Image (cartoon, grey):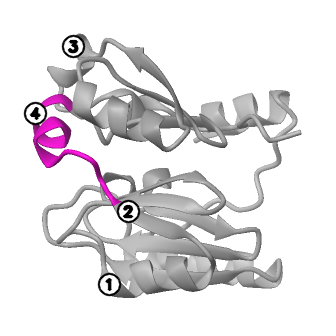
């Protein structure tokens, strides 16, 4: 934690809170819906103690936090929900909580199923990194998923992740987003 805090400080990014006690949290379990709403997943890598501490902090900042249970065996929110713009999200059917989809739609999102479950399962096609609005870096070798994303005006940057896949992961698993491109 101290190395992360030091690096963030050197980058000018403040640390607002350090979770304490038995709190367990993984960053891929918290996603922003809009500037005043965050969703957080309760599951294998984020427990209720962490959710309570995060909810308290965000509440002090005027931000609503909505918690959802992850399906058993789902590692984190990022494995079921990917937002590529402030009005477009992809979800993994039968993994994503119905209430979460309803919240996204109420907030004006178009919610679409991931393009190809076979590519997502065998080649980590859903494990992409959002670089900016409608711009993603995704694992190479997923032609159906890439074509679908591009048909929606999403810029795709395919990157080989063969070595990462040996550890049952891809680029999203090892990326901590500190800043993204924004529309001008």
Q: Are marks 3 and 1 in contact (CB under 8 Å)?
A: no
Residue corresponding to mark 1? 98
Residue corresponding to mark 2? 112
Image position, residue 24 (x, y; %): 41, 63
Real-space Cα distance between discs 4 and 1? Answer: 25 Å
The tag earlier along the polypeptide, 3 or 4, is 4
Name which quarter of the figure residue 44 lies in. Answer: bottom left
The tag earlier along the polypeptide, 4 or 2, is 2
Q: Is residue 30 visible?
A: yes
Residue corresponding to mark 4? 122
Real-space Cα distance between discs 3 and 1? Answer: 33 Å
Front residue of 167 and 83: 83
User: In which quadrant is the C terminus drawn?
Assistant: top right
Q: Does the magenta portion include 98?
A: no
Image position, residue 43 (x, y; %): 28, 70
Q: Secondary structure at mark 3?
A: helix
Residue at the image position 62 percent from the left and 64 percent from the top: 32
- Which is closer to the viewer, label 3 or label 4? 4
Q: Are marks 3 and 4 in contact (CB under 8 Å)?
A: no
Q: Which residues are magenta?
A: 113-123
Q: Main secondary structure of the magenta part?
A: helix
Real-space Cα distance between discs 2 and 3? Answer: 27 Å
Real-space Cα distance between discs 3 and 4? Answer: 11 Å
Q: Residue furthest front?
A: 151
Front residue of 12 and 144: 144
137 displayed left or right of 8? left
The tag earlier along the polypeptide, 3 or 1, is 1
């Amino acid at each position: 934690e101290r190395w992360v805090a030091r690096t963030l400080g050197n980058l000018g990014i403040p640390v607002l809170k350090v979770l304490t006690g038995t709190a367990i949290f993984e960053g891929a379990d918290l996603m922003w819906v809009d500037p005043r709403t965050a969703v957080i997943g309760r599951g294998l890598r984020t427990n209720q103690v962490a959710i309570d501490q995060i909810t308290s902090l965000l509440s002090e900042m005027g931000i609503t936090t909505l918690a959802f249970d992850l399906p058993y065996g789902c590692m984190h929110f990022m494995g079921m929900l990917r937002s590529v713009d402030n009005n477009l999200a992809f979800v993994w059917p039968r993994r994503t909580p119905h209430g979460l989809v309803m919240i996204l739609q109420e907030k004006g999102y178009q919610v679409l199923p991931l393009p190809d479950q076979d590519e997502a399962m065998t080649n980590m096609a859903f494990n992409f990194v959002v670089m900016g609005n409608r711009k993603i870096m995704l694992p190479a070798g997923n032609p159906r998923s890439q074509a679908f994303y591009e048909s929606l005006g999403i810029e795709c940057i395919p990157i080989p992740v063969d070595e990462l896949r040996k550890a049952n992961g891809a680029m999203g698993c090892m990326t901590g987003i500190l800043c993204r491109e924004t529309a001008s």
